[in-house]
Amino acid sequence: SLEAVEKLTKEVRQAVMSYFAPQIEERGKLRADKIKFRRFKNAVQMAQKADQILRAARVKPKALPLKLGVPIFEYASLEEDEDLANKWAGLLASALMGDHVLAAYPKILAELTPAEARMLDSVNRWHAQGPVDLDTWKAKGYTAETLFKQERLTEEQFRVCAQNLIRLGLWKTGDPILWDALGDSLKEFQFTY
């Protein structure tokens, strides 16, 4: 009968699970341990880089508030990209130097992709070199196309990155590079910060 088959199936399943459950549980713990170790290693490397920054600046570290320390270490431990790992080290060093580091900074940094971080670095270098107007930037080769090619992004990927940077408040919609790339589509992203 169908009930007898269901009962037998249930009993067999329970017997099999009682036999294999310890091995399955141990495998899960082993995987979790490997992940914990990778995260620990990433956090230690970040702390070592931050220490190098402090030593190079000859600055004695100040107390790190838990509200900053915990999210910095939590998020940084997940980071496997070298450029972003260096940014985490810089953020930790800034916090340890007593610089004004807002509690939102770790959350913002955690939401950046490597391409977005490199795009920001490029645009910040461009801003540091003089007047910010579209004609000057185009003459210097500071264009959205330069960024797509540099990051090997399609125009659509660039748009997604730019929109995330705007959402995070890291790019303002009036930036010439964005108008060059996104033009009228920016009108939908007129945020108030």
Image (cartoon, rainbow, N blue to C red):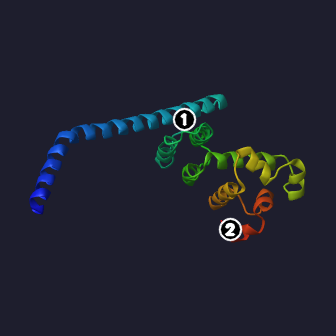
Towards the viewer: 151 or 175: 151
When the figure is inspected, residue 75 is found, relative to residue 183, above or below; the finding is above
Q: Residue at point 84% right, 55% down?
A: 132
When the figure is inspected, residue 188 is found, relative to residue 73, above or below; the finding is below
Position in image of residue 105 (x %, y %): 58, 51
* Residue 58 sits in quarter: top right
Position in image of residue 147 (x %, y %): 75, 49
Label 1: how many Cα within 10 Å (few below 14, some 14–19, many 20+): many
Disc 2 on helix, strand or loop?
Answer: helix
Which is more N-terminal, label 1 or label 2? 1
Disc 1 on helix, strand or loop?
Answer: helix
When the figure is inspected, residue 45 is found, relative to residue 69, above or below; the finding is above
Q: Amino acid at mark 1?
A: Met
Image mark for residue 80: none
Residue ID for mark 2: 189
- The span from disc 2 to disc 1 (Cα, nearest Å) is 35 Å
Residue ID for mark 1: 46
Q: Residue at point 33% right, 35% down?
A: 30
Position in image of residue 74 (x %, y %): 47, 44
Q: Residue furthest front?
A: 1
Towards the viewer: 110 or 15: 15
Q: Amino acid at mark 2?
A: Phe
